[in-house]
Image (tube, rainbow, N blue to C red):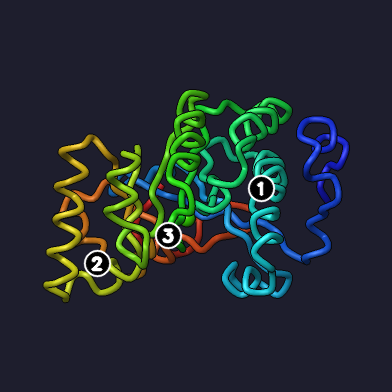
Amino acid sequence: MSLPHEYFSKESGVCATVALNEYDVYFCYQPIVSFPAGKVVSYEALVRGGNHENATVFFQQLSDAEFTRFDVDSKYIAIADYVKTGATRDLSLNFSTKTLTRFADLPSMLDDMLRSLGISVNSVIIEITETDAIEDIDKFLNTIERLRALGFRIAIDDFGAGFSGLSLLTHCVPDIIKIDSSLVLHVSADKVKQSIVTAIRMIAADCGIVVVAEGVEHQQDLLWLLDAKVDLFQGYLFAKPTAQPSKSEAWARLGLR
Ligand SMILES: [Ca+2]
């Protein structure tokens, strides 16, 4: 698995030297589903290390500059490998606010990548993860505006965790909010989490934003989230991320189609 150097050197001139196989990583895809319809609406591309460790372990090994570069370069592989799986649902791609702030060429690069792979920008969602304070809000918002103008949808990722929250929401009203798994785990038995999720749901309804619950692991939490009118769900209760998206046994137990 290596990056198509010619593509990058010709189109952007900035990514010619990076190859994913330097890093021993690959992409897995986890479904985001509607329930009880049991329909997969999209898949999120997730980085996995060669020993199946999650992205956090892998990213800790990279310098700041290496991380930003990897964040951009790896997306061609994420999209190309997704096309190879034969899946036809929308695709979610993760980006940090740092990458969106620093790479002014990102919207046109992504557009070029998708064109070369025969994918419409309308079927791609950009998930923004805010792990640090935004370095330059004007540059960041400019990138978001250009992504929107091209037809990408925007999701705020891990909403309610760390920096990722209300500040980002006011700067950039997204199409989708993904509620962080820390608020979803055991929500059915936690009054404070219930209040927060209910408030997020109300804000989203007022602003026309779709709400996704991340990290759904327990059926009782799913039932509470359904009552709270959360729109979509993602988590081990439905399926783990896999290199080849497919229905798991858990799906069958839940009666999903
Ligand atoms: Ca994400």
Q: Residue at x 45, y 30 (%)?
A: 145
Which residue occupies the foreground of this view, 27 or 238? Answer: 27
Give the residue number, with chain letter if any, for mark 3: 133
- Can residue 239 be seen in the rendering of this structure? yes
**Image depth: mark 2 or mark 3 in front:** 3
231 displayed left or right of 110? left
* Three-letter amino acid code of the residue under disc 1: Val
Q: Earlier in the sequence, mark 2 or mark 1?
A: 1
Image location (x, y in percent) of residue 148: 45, 29
Give the residue number, with chain letter if any, for mark 1: 72
Crowdedness near tag 3: few (<14), some (14–19) or many (≥20) residues, C-alpha within 10 Å: some
Which residue occupies the foreground of this view, 162 or 112? Answer: 162
Residue 109, quarter of picture: top right
Per the image, label 3 sits on a secondary structure element best described as loop
* Three-letter amino acid code of the residue under disc 3: Ala
Give the residue number, with chain letter if any, for mark 2: 221
Rounded to the nearest angstrom, the CA distance separating label 1 from label 3 is: 19 Å
109 displayed left or right of 137? right
- Can residue 1 be seen in the rendering of this structure? no
Q: Is 117 placed above or below 45 here?
A: above
